[in-house]
Image: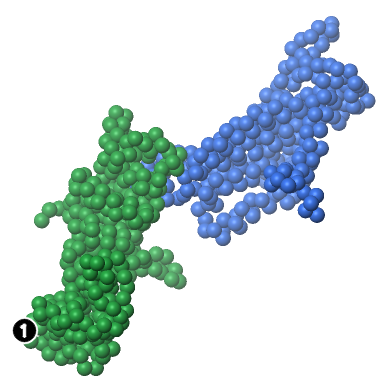
Amino acid sequence: MPAASIDVRGVSKIYNPGSQQPVKALDTVSLSIADNEFFTLLGPSGCGKTTLLRLIAGFEQVSGGEILLFGEEIAHLQPSQRSVNTVFQHYALFPHMSVAENVGFGLERLKKPKDEVVSTVKRMLSLVKMDHLADRRPSQLSGGQQQRVALARALAPSPKVLLLDEPLSALDLKLRQTMREELKQLQRETGITFVFVTHDQDEALAMSDRIAVMSEGHIQQIGSPTEIYEHPVNQFVADFIGDSNFLDGEIIAIEDDIVTCKIGSESVFEAENSGNHAVGDQVTLFLRPEKISLTHSTDESTDNHRRGKVSNIVYLGNEAAYTVDMGDGISLMAQARPKEDGNLPFAIDDDIAVGYSNRALRVLAK
Amino acid sequence: MSKWLPKSAAARRWLGLTPAYVMIGIFMLVPISIMAVYSFLEPNPYGGVLPEPSVAAYVKLFLEYDLEDNLVFNPGYINIIFRSFQLSIMATVICLVMGFPVAYYITLQPENKRNIYIYLITIPFWTNLLIRTFAWIIILGRGGVIETPLLNLGIIDDSLKMMYTDGAIAIGLTYSYLPLMVLPIYASLEKLDFRLLEAASDLYSSRFQIMTKVVIPLCKPGIVAGCILVFIPCIGAFIAPNLLGGGKKLMLGSLVQFQFASARNWPFGSALSMLLLSAVVVALIFYARSARKKEYIQGTA
């Protein structure tokens, strides 16, 4: 296994310790980030992801635990003594300096020779395609351009790890999508470990090698984007990433890898057995909407066939989200593409067949 | 009513500003013009001026007639002007060195506390400057608050002779105008984006470098404004020089006051005032230049 670039060991952070209302932002969090990895900390606001990033950067002091940068303990060091650089959410470019001066700032503080500073600044600015605006002031740049300068400024001193604090959140949608690809490409080109903080699941899925999903100061799950999306360990992760159908029920039979659950008063669903479950357990079943096929007549290619009635339609352009009433107080969300002439395949109150495979329906522990 | 008002919006705006223009005209431009004219007239020995043109007042700044009626160089007034600038610059520098940390400290406080501190800074303005300067006589003077305990404890044998010195004047000036340094610096520091400090420390800056490379350049307009707000009243001050300098160590302000009150040489007092005014205008031009830069910087947000 390659050396971890960042090793977070049992780190806790408590704000206002000893006061009336201490706030536990991080609770003994441990994670290991590999070298050259694009690692994302994903979670809702207040989950502790930014706190963790600020602890790694050194803007906050840990309340407990240790942080290692390539095996060297850094938790007690000043931000200026850590070989990590940050891209701030609102860029934090120095308004009194030109673009080139901003990018050269870190290099000059490191007392690099003048000609090296000049050539590195040039190289960094061309890397982010900003070389033609080197003499501008930050106030004369658009949001996307400021973002690129902030990236160049943080990359210029060749940090061992680059920290990115929701850097795309202030950009508009189109630009955000372009920047995603550029960031990913930049990470591959520079070979620097990126630690990326976001609350946007699409960003996380699109760019990351691995994602840590966080909630209330704890890490819920660490895994590749597909692991997180396809095999969430609990309802929080499943709910936070993508759309999901959740069915609460009780296990009534277990046979090989098939778990049979009673949902509602009389409906019975079979799902893939994902672990240690026993008959009588209260569980939540989980099914992604895109795994459900909606047809007018029964679709023989799926394991399960049920019938339901369309109760709501949300048109999204490339597809439509259907809410299907299955009876017994159960309703499922599913998706269907519009037909080739652009019309939707089903209308409200249509009686339709709902199909899915057993492997798509999973059991989540409570 | 509205039919009396001018039709165009631009003309109405000018109408709204008329009272201000009238005030500035009557109470500023007219008196300054009178001063300018007086400075080129002959003095009336009983006060006022004689309507005869003369440049004698300006000549008097540099030259005097010796016993044989020859014009010779007289350094007396030049020395007073020189000392005025020296003491004013000294007071300004002391105010800056003392005021900047105070302003910075206040900026770092939580918002409700900041307002209390700013309120405390402005409290001295509630009392007359004359009375506050008299208080310094009690503190610095012979048998005063500083000397008496030291004499009684036997640490010193004789009076420290702190009063009637340039130092006493500098203390008085610093005390009088320190709030005028703190307030503008605070105003510019308050607008400072403190995330920039984090960015600087992330980019390998020491605390000292964060100050010199980020904080001070960004609040330079506030520093310049503070320096000018302190320097201008210092150069024209006459209360502190008269009371704490004992009237022997004259400054420009006290010299002007002396010409109008006791010496009854109004043209010379006017000439001195014009000199003072030009010094102030030069300082303000300097400020206007730095203020333009400030707008440039603030376009960022």
Residue A353 in view of the camera? yes
Question: Who is closer to the viewer here, A183 or B15?
Answer: B15
Could you tell me which secondary element the residue under label 1 belongs to? Answer: loop
Q: Residue placed at 45% from the left, 50% from the top?
A: B194
Residue A44 position, x and y percent, is 33, 67
Q: Residues within 10 Å of mark 1 (few under 14, many from 20)?
A: few
Q: Up-down: is B213 above or below B57?
A: below
A114 relative position to B181: left or right: left
- Using the rendered view, name the quadrant where residue A146 is placed: top left
Q: How many marks?
A: 1
Residue B166 in view of the camera? no
A301 relative position to A84: left or right: left
Residue A196 position, x and y percent, is 28, 56
- Residue at the outermost front position: A341
Q: Tell me which chain appears blue.
A: B
Residue A216 position, x and y percent, is 32, 70
Q: Residue placed at 33% from the left, 45% from the top?
A: A148
- Residue at the outermost bottom position: A266
Image hue for chain A: green
Please name the residue that numbered disc 1 is placed on.
Answer: A256
Question: Who is closer to the viewer here, A53 or B178?
Answer: A53
Q: Up-down: is B63 above or below A184?
A: above
| Chain to which mark 1 belongs | A
Q: Amino acid at mark 1?
A: Asp
B272 relative position to A98: left or right: right
Residue A153 position, x and y percent, is 33, 42
Quadrant occupied by the N terminus of chain B: bottom right
- Residue at the outermost right position: B46
Q: Residue placed at 23% from the left, 46% from the top?
A: A186
Q: Residue placed at 19% from the left, 57% from the top?
A: A209
- Using the rendered view, name the quadrant where residue B237 is placed: top right
Q: Up-down: is A294 above or below A338?
A: below
